[in-house]
């Protein structure tokens, strides 16, 4: 019988460890991070027989460094070397359910849950030793793997006698004093980087299982096409190793012994299959006009003060459809064996994926085990969940064999959910002293949240089953769409309206969600207003800010670039935002140079304040990567399509920054160890786009409000 760690925990005998509750006991919703969902110490860590600990997190490692960060906080609270901490991530049979790894919340939620669970474990181990020795806790010393009193010593293993702590994190948990920290706040190398550099098995694309077979899907020519006729006889005659062709409605998959055989079968079937006429995509009409003409849900999402008069300055900005552009196309392995389905996936939510598969395949939840693995390039809802569902669907049709399904570059580019196109319109009125008196902002966008989340209708394959699984209409404006749509500035009268439409392309979460487009528009408009008010861009922003931490990142950025010398055809622009208006503070400066008909990004600087910093190297890595990715989005990227299909199907039709185009990057971290940690992984994208647009204006005298900032727009 399949027994998961989760099942085992529910049924095992419990070790009752008595401890005195403090006088103040917080409510469940006062617990930090994901402890609110699961307050059991045992859910977050276990003590091994050798005195080491094993830490569990439901979050995925996406390059944000959460694996190292949770190890640091656990090791710190338990006085262990970092090497004595093993981290298990995102496994539905082993780790706590932390839903999706999203919103730059891994440190806030998972690392803080582990920190408090480790501190509670230390407290309870001390109490257990104190009870055994009949000594006050205050006289005991807590060391690596042991507890001491004078010349007496007892190991954690001896204290627990083969069992684990079963208490919940309740009460006023005493954290280690920050002035005693040895690991937290120090730069720590991430062990997985070594494995990547050495090309060792790390990514799911590298995973191989004994007896594994290979699969490919046969795709229609467009979103709306339906299967009319499929003749698989030629495939079986021409290609050896074909194990099965699986067809359900318009969903077609092929399984073969070898990977190249599966690829050949996919190509052959693609040429012989017949589909209905394609669903035309909008062309011939400017995309902005087309999107604004679509039926939309309209809501006022922010309102402050009362409008006192007309606005006098207006501007419209545009952000195109963007793709994740994952370097490794999506991949999954699935194995339906003896009534249990195991799926290896780089989904950012293994528990939501399990729930989705449960509803899709009608399998009991406890017969589905999803194991998270790193994917090569995960920046939101890419094809990971889709390929996992397709692999699971094939595994059910071909049981007892592990099946590996690998998407091609063409499939990844054409079928992944994109980040929505957005139209952003800002208007304002300035006072005679150059202050913003009134701010009106209106956005048009599709949703940014169409992850499966337990609903198979959001999977790609749902469209092609017979019958298809219909999507439910949105009941309200999506929170990701309006992210950072309210300016973080002190403005008396503010109104923000959102129009959420259902556009022609498949969309969902992409790094920073709507914040990328909204901050690009707001910070570009702030620059335009500063010029109108005849103010310095730094001073104009600061005169509209009340938050000292926001002012501090701008002042530090000003110091950072004050000695830069600007040559002809060069420009420096700045921008600022606080991610989600509640997370990390980030200011960015960019220098661009116009050379002939090329726009070159020379430098990017960023100052970031994410509160207490666990691993400064990890935060810098995140910010550096975000700067480069956002610069690529801003200068090069746009999903293209014609009347039939997506035409951005490779790196030529959808170019991203090449290594030779990456600018010099400098990141300054303002560490505030006494402040709470703040999500930071998506803080830099929006300010980068605006800083680049503002720099381009100074270099060229041309204000480009439509992304991407390609040279042709300087001539229009």
Image (cartoon, helix red, strand yellow):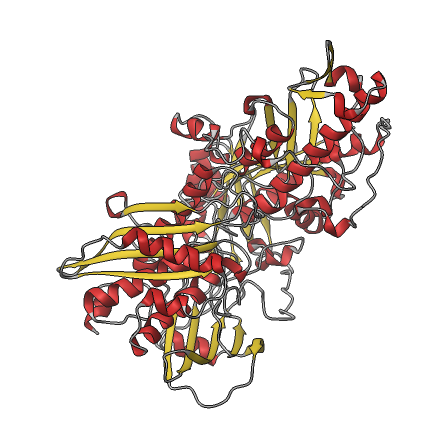
Which residue appears at 30% of the width and 65% of the height?
Answer: 694
Task: Quadrant for the N terminus, please.
Answer: top right
Q: Could you tell me how many numbered marks the image carries?
A: 0
Q: Residue pushed farthest top? A: 151
In the image, taking residue 601 as reference, residue 70 lies left or right, namely: right
Q: Quadrant of residue 457?
A: bottom right
Q: Residue pushed farthest bottom? A: 309
Q: Is residue 272 above or below residue 302?
A: above
Task: Quadrant for the C terminus, please.
Answer: bottom left
Task: State the residue in front, 26 or 458.
Answer: 26
Q: Quadrant of residue 13?
A: top right
Q: Does the rendering let one see residue 647?
A: no
Q: Is residue 536 above or below residue 99?
A: below
Which residue appears at 32% of the width and 78% of the height?
Answer: 533
Task: State the residue in front, 607 or 64.
Answer: 607
Residue 209 position within the rendered picture, expressed as x and y whole percent measured from the top left: 55, 27
Task: State the residue in front, 560 or 663.
Answer: 560
Residue 222 position within the rendered picture, expressed as x and y whole percent measured from the top left: 45, 61
In the image, taking residue 359 as reference, residue 15 lies left or right, namely: right
Residue 697 position within the rendered picture, expressed as x and y whole percent measured from the top left: 25, 68
Task: State the residue in front, 255 or 45.
Answer: 45
Q: Is residue 282 above or below residue 140?
A: below
Which residue appears at 53% of the width and 67% of the height?
Answer: 482
Q: Does the rendering let one see residue 101?
A: yes
Which residue appears at 53% of the width and 46% of the height?
Answer: 384
Residue 318 position within the rendered picture, expressed as x and y whole percent measured from the top left: 38, 70
């Amino acid at each position: 019988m399949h027994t998961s760690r989760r099942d085992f925990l529910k049924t095992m005998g419990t070790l009752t460890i008595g401890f005195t509750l403090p006088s103040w006991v917080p409510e469940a919703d006062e617990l930090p991070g994901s402890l609110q969902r699961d307050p059991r110490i045992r859910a977050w860590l276990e003590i091994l027989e050798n005195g080491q600990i094993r830490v569990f997190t439901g979050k995925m490692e996406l390059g944000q460094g959460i694996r190292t960060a949770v190890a640091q906080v656990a090791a710190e609270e338990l006085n262990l070397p970092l090497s004595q901490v093993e981290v298990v991530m995102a496994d539905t049979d082993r780790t706590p359910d932390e839903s999706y790894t999203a919103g730059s919340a891994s440190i806030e939620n998972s690392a803080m849950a582990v920190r408090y669970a480790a501190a509670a474990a230390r407290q309870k181990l001390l109490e257990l030793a104190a009870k055994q020795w009949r000594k006050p806790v205050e006289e005991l010393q807590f060391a690596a793997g042991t507890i001491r009193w004078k010349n007496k010593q007892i190991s954690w293993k001896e204290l627990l006698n083969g069992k684990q702590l079963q208490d919940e994190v309740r009460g006023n948990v005493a954290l280690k004093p920050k002035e005693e920290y040895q690991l937290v706040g120090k730069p720590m190398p991430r062990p997985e980087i070594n494995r990547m550099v050495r090309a060792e098995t790390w990514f799911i694309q590298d995973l191989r299982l004994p007896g594994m077979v290979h699969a490919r899907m046969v795709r229609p020519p467009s979103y709306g096409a339906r299967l009319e006729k499929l003749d698989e006889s030629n495939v079986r005659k021409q290609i050896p190793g074909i194990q099965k062709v699986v067809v359900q409605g318009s969903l077609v998959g092929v399984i073969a012994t070898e990977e190249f055989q599966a690829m050949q079968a996919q190509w052959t079937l693609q040429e012989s299959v017949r589909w209905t006429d394609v669903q035309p995509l909008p062309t011939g009409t400017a995309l902005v006009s087309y999107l604004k003409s679509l039926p939309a849900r309209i809501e006022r999402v922010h309102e402050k003060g009362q409008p006192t008069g007309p606005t006098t300055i207006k501007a419209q900005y545009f952000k195109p459809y963007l793709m994740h552009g994952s370097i490794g196309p999506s991949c999954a392995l699935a194995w339906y064996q003896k009534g249990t389905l195991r799926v290896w996936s780089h989904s950012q939510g293994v528990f939501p994926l399990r729930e989705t598969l449960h509803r899709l395949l009608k399998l009991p939840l406890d017969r589905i085990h999803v194991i998270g693995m790193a994917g090569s390039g995960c920046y939101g809802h890419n094809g990971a969940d889709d390929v996992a569902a397709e692999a699971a669907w094939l595994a059910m049709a071909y049981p007892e064999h592990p099946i590996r399904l690998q998407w091609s570059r063409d499939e990844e580019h054409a079928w992944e959910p994109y980040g929505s196109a957005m139209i952003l319109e800002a208007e304002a009125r300035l006072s005679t002293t150059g202050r913003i008196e009134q701010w009106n902002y209106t956005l048009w966008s599709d949703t940014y949240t169409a992850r499966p989340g337990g609903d198979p209708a959001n999977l790609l394959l749902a469209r092609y089953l017979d019958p298809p699984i219909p999507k439910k209409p949105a009941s309200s404006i999506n929170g990701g769409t309006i992210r950072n749509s309210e300016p973080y500035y002190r403005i008396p009268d503010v109104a923000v309206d959102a129009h959420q439409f259902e556009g022609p392309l498949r969309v969902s979460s992409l790094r920073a969600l709507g914040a990328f487009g909204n901050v690009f528009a707001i910070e570009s408009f702030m620059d335009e207003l500063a010029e109108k008010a005849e103010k310095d861009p730094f001073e104009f922003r600061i005169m509209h800010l009340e938050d000292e931490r926001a002012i501090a990142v701008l002042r530090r950025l000003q110091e950072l670039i004050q000695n830069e010398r600007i040559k002809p055809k060069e420009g420096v622009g700045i921008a600022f935002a606080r991610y989600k208006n509640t997370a990390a503070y980030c200011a960015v400066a960019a220098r661009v140079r116009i050379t002939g008909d090329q726009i070159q990004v020379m430098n990017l600087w960023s100052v970031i304040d994410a509160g207490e910093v666990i691993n400064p190297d990890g935060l810098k890595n995140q910010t550096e990567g975000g700067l480069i990715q956002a610069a690529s989005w801003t200068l090069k990227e746009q999903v293209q399509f014609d009347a039939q299909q997506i035409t951005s199907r490779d790196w030529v039709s959808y170019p991203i920054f090449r290594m030779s185009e990456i600018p010099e990057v400098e990141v300054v971290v303002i560490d505030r160890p006494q402040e709470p940690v703040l999500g930071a992984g998506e803080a830099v994208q929006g300010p980068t786009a605006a800083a680049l647009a503002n720099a381009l204006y100074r270099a060229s005298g041309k204000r480009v409000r439509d992304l991407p900032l390609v040279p042709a727009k300087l001539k229009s």
